[in-house]
Image (tube, grey):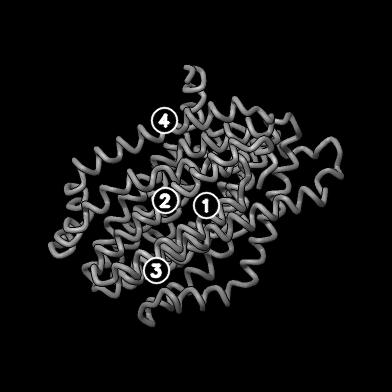
Amino acid sequence: MSLSLNRRIWMLAWPLLLSNLTAPLLGLVDTAVVGHLDHPRYLAAVALGGNFFMFLYFSFNFLRMGTTGFASQARGGEKDTRVVLLRGLLLSTGLGLALIALSPLLRETGLWLLGGSDDVQGLAGDYINIRILGAPAALANFALIGFAIGTHNTRVPLKMTVLMHSTNALLDILLVQVWHLDVRGVAIASATAEYVGLAGGLFWLRGALRPPARQERLWQPHAILALMAVNRDIFLRSLALLSCFFFFAAQGARLGDAVLAANAVLITFLLLLSNLLDGFANAAEALVGEAHGKNDHQALGQAIGATGRWTVACAALGLLAFSLGGVPLIHLLTDLPDIRDTAIIYLPWMLLLPLTASAGFWLDGIFVGATWGAAMRNTMLVAVGIFFVLWALTRGWENHGLWLAMNGFMAGRGLLMGWVLKKRLAAPGYQRQS
């Protein structure tokens, strides 16, 4: 592994690592601002509405991944990358407007699934009605961030994230603490911040927004269909992943409030690990896509090997951090004795996650860069099947069985994707496989 390749990986990864680290701060600001109001229903409503949008927007993360893959391949093939961004923005804007049109149905379905008291559901409904107006900007930001990563301009996502989160925090304070708009103020702040972030992203990527040299290239049917196909496959993959986590949370709730809360605390460990690994997974997307666009098998192998070694280093760091800091972190996240004691009982399962989950995050980056959407979908569906089989076989173990199934799901995903990668690299026409 050359020093220059290591340096390229780090230069791509560090802005994304910082961007990922700022993401949890937004939730902390929302919680802190609403948590000081005179009734807990406001905090509960924001939590409910926040979960609604977390699931909704995560389902459309394919706009980020698909744009990254096609942009990095266009860059590697020395093709015009601008059409990739413009197609991504057109698609994301159309989908965002569709979400606004469908918002009454989405709101009622989401609140029915999430539950909560009548007062909390009413406030959460107000939150959703306002924040959904930011959907076109939120989805367009996925396309902008994906394009920036694919064209190796990873400082743009960092600047967009900082701009959005600082705007959101400032408006939270003004609208909630000064102008007393409670839950509505938090929703207005979030929706407005999405548009501010969009404006910043369009400004920083303004050079890519000039019309292509040949205007008709934007509307090439085969290119539009290819983008839709990859996005469809990644969308289905994301839904399968969400179903697994939703089922995990629902089954934990059936085991009692203490188990539900303890599992929520422990999932924070997985979020921290994913934020650490995503920076190098995103670097893999950019480097693999560029090599794929050039049809350069040697560069592809070097990018895969180098980002793989960084992933192993991150997994080792995560294992060490969880082993030494697991109990202190649990104590930091909650001061309720029942939840602390329950979380510590299941902590050993969490210590396995750096070993079982890391490969899957890294391979996601490789598959996104190569735009192997169908393979991502198929391996995810099989891994979800592994999860449900393991859960069914170990139901008598209760929460231990759930955590075994979660680790089996993560390990299965990595092993399946690794097997597909090995087969494709060995095939003479691997660049054309989907």
| Mark 3 lies on residue | 247
The structure residue drawn at horizontal position 73% and vertical position 38%, both measured from the top left corner, is: 82
Q: Position of residue 234 (x, y in %)?
A: 58, 54
What kind of residue is marked 2? Ala
Q: Position of residue 425 (x, y in %)?
A: 59, 36
Say few, some or many: other residues with alpha carbon within 10 Å of mark 1 (under 14 / 14 to 19 / 20 or more).
many
| Mark 1 lies on residue | 193
Q: Which mark is residue 63?
A: none
Say few, some or many: other residues with alpha carbon within 10 Å of mark 4 (under 14 / 14 to 19 / 20 or more).
few
Of residue 30 and residue 311, the one placed in the foreground of this image is 311
Q: CA distance from mark 3 to mark 4?
A: 33 Å
Q: CA distance from mark 2 to mark 4?
A: 37 Å
Q: CA distance from mark 2 to mark 3?
A: 32 Å
Q: CA distance from mark 2 to mark 1?
A: 9 Å
What kind of residue is marked 4? Arg
**Residue 378 higher or lower than 422, as above or below:** below
Q: CA distance from mark 1 to mark 4?
A: 37 Å
| Mark 4 lies on residue | 309
Q: Horizontal placement of 395 versus 413: left or right?
A: left
The structure residue drawn at horizontal position 56% and vertical position 48%, both measured from the top left corner, is: 196
For the residues bearing labels 2 and 1, Cβ distance under 8 angstroms: no
Of residue 348 and residue 62, the one placed in the foreground of this image is 348
Of residue 126 and residue 250, the one placed in the foreground of this image is 250
Q: Earlier in the sequence, mark 2 or mark 4?
A: 2
Q: Position of residue 404 (x, y in %)?
A: 30, 59
